Amino acid sequence: MTLPGVVFSFFMALLLGSLLHLWRGGSLYRLLLYLVLSVIGFFGGHFAANLLSIRFLQVGTINLGFGILGSVLLLILGYWLSPKMNH
């Protein structure tokens, strides 16, 4: 993965985490949780696709399709498992 690919991947992952926080709201803790989970999920999905030699929505050196899929799945899991606080 090239440096521009890494930067683009971080941008996409942080965008997905930010969109979830914008949609569902929450505290600063939740924003940080979503951002971290999104980055881990994106890179996890990308590397899993590379290991399995799967190409889905390939953009340069990035497996964008599986990166987004990994990010969304980890965000859903994190949202579901995170403690619900009353505001």
Image (cartoon, rainbow, N blue to C red):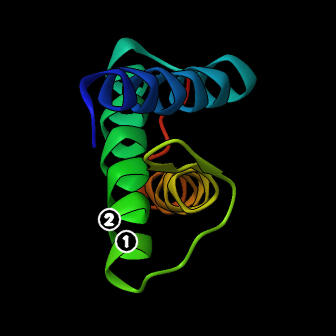
Residue holding disc 2: 47
Q: Quadrant of residue 6?
A: top left
Estimate how packed mark 2 is, as few (under 14), some (14 to 19) or many (20 or more) residues with alpha carbons within 10 Å: some
Q: Amino acid at mark 2?
A: Phe
Q: Looking at the picture, does residue 2 appear above or below residue 26? A: below
Q: Position of residue 85 (x, y in %)?
A: 47, 35
Q: Quadrant of residue 36?
A: top left
Q: Residue at x 35, y 39 (%)?
A: 39
Q: Which mark is residue 59?
A: none
**Residue most toward the bottom?**
52
Q: Residue at x 36, y 45 (%)?
A: 37
Q: Quadrant of residue 8?
A: top left
Q: Position of residue 3 (x, y in %)?
A: 25, 24
Instruction: Please identify the quadrant where the C terminus is shown.
Output: top right
The total number of labels drawn is 2
Q: CA distance from mark 2 to mark 1?
A: 5 Å
Q: Looking at the picture, does residue 55 appear above or below residue 36? A: below
Q: Position of residue 73 (x, y in %)?
A: 56, 63
Q: Secondary structure at mark 1?
A: helix
Instruction: Please identify the quadrant where the N terminus is shown.
Output: top left
Q: Residue at x 38, y 31 (%)?
A: 5
Q: Amino acid at mark 1?
A: Asn
Q: Which mark is residue 50?
A: 1
Q: As rendered, which of 12 and 59 lies closer to the eye?
A: 59
Q: Residue at x 66, y 23 (%)?
A: 19
Q: As rendered, which of 83 and 15 lies closer to the eye?
A: 15
Q: Position of residue 82 (x, y in %)?
A: 41, 50
Q: As rendered, which of 26 and 43 lies closer to the eye?
A: 43
Estimate how packed mark 1 is, as few (under 14), some (14 to 19) or many (20 or more) residues with alpha carbons within 10 Å: some
Q: Are marks 2 and 1 in contact (CB under 8 Å)?
A: yes
